């Protein structure tokens, strides 16, 4: 089967990622999206001190989850 890369003489190989890295990247992206949404449209207005503690706790949980995937 002919492809554009074959016609141009360019042999491109897709980077390979192990499933744990894909999961870690996905979790990190979801965390960043949810954190952004929470920052711009919070359900409750929390004091800055509680908000920082919440982010720290969530980040630690994310890191522990990612470390268990490896």
Image: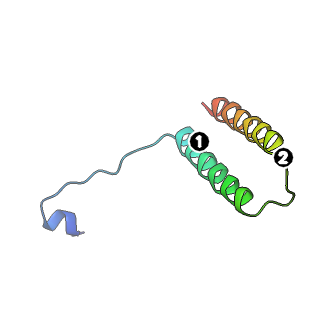
Q: Residue at x 78, y 44 (%)?
A: 48
- Up the image or down, 45 lies above or below 28; here it is below
In this rendered view, identify the residue nearer to me: 26 or 33.
33
In this rendered view, identify the residue nearer to me: 48 or 9.
48
Q: Which mark is residue 55?
A: none
Q: Secondary structure at mark 2?
A: loop
Give the tally of numbered discs: 2
Q: Which residue is the site of mark 1? A: 24
Dot 1 or dot 2: first in sequence order is 1
Q: Which scheme is used to colour this image of the protein?
A: rainbow
Question: For the N terminus, which image quadrant?
Answer: bottom left
Where's residue 9, x and y in %?
Answer: 12, 60
Where's residue 66, x and y in %?
Answer: 64, 35
- Up the image or down, 7 lies above or below 26; here it is below
Question: For the C terminus, which image quadrant?
Answer: top right
Q: Nearer the viewer, mark 1 or mark 2?
A: 2
Q: Which residue is the site of mark 2? A: 47
């Amino acid at each position: 089967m002919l492809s554009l890369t074959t016609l141009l003489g360019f042999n491109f190989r897709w980077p390979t990622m192990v499933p744990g890295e894909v999961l870690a990247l996905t979790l990190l992206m979801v965390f960043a999206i949810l954190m952004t949404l929470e920052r711009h449209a919070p359900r409750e207005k929390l004091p800055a001190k509680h908000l920082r503690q919440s982010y720290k706790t969530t980040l630690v949980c994310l890191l522990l989850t990612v470390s268990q995937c490896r």
